[in-house]
Amino acid sequence: MLAEENLEGWVRLPKEFLRPTGGKSFLLRVRGDSMNPAEVGGVRIEDGDLVLVRQQLVAESGQIVVALIDGEATVKRLERGPGYYLLKPESSDRSHKSIIVHDDFSLVGVGCLILKRGSRLLELNE
């Protein structure tokens, strides 16, 4: 999807979801199935879910990240190689392929929580 601010609504989150305090976070709606068996905090990432993303410019290999490639946002697992990065899908659909990048992408942040469509937290705030 094109990476642009698209305000769908407001969600009030408990402060403990936004650790460490003082950092910036945002919610990103997942579109598609490129990460459908992958988990953040023990919760699967599925189409329509909201991912709470802690904004940061660096991530550890193995973390679920949001990256910008040619102005498009993608949620993938980050792996580091010698002189390159691999953005790996984890999908039940084998047509999704890994993306090899060098310095031609921007790391936006790390996924830290999944909010499921229809969850009580979202029902109270949407």
Image: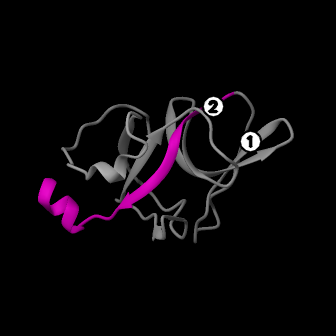
Which is more toward the observer, 6 or 112?
A: 112
Please give the range of residues in magenta.
104-125
- Per the rendering, the mark at residue 112 is none
Based on the picture, tell me whether residue 112 belongs to the magenta stretch: yes
Residue 96 in the figure: left or right of residue 74: right
Q: Is residue 38 above or below residue 75?
A: below
Q: Give how far across and how far down residue 74 sits, in percent.
A: 52, 45
Residue to which mark 2 is pinned: 105
Measured as percent of width and height from the top left, residue 14 is found at 26, 53
Q: Which mark is residue 85?
A: 1
The spot of residue 25 in percent (x, y) is 38, 39
Residue 124 lies left or right of residue 57; in this view the side is: left
Q: Is residue 36 left or right of residue 63?
A: left
Helix, strand, or loop for circle 2? loop
Residue 97, quarter of picture: bottom right
Three-letter code, disc 2: Phe
Residue 22 belongs to magenta span: no
In which quarter of the view is residue 27 placed?
top left
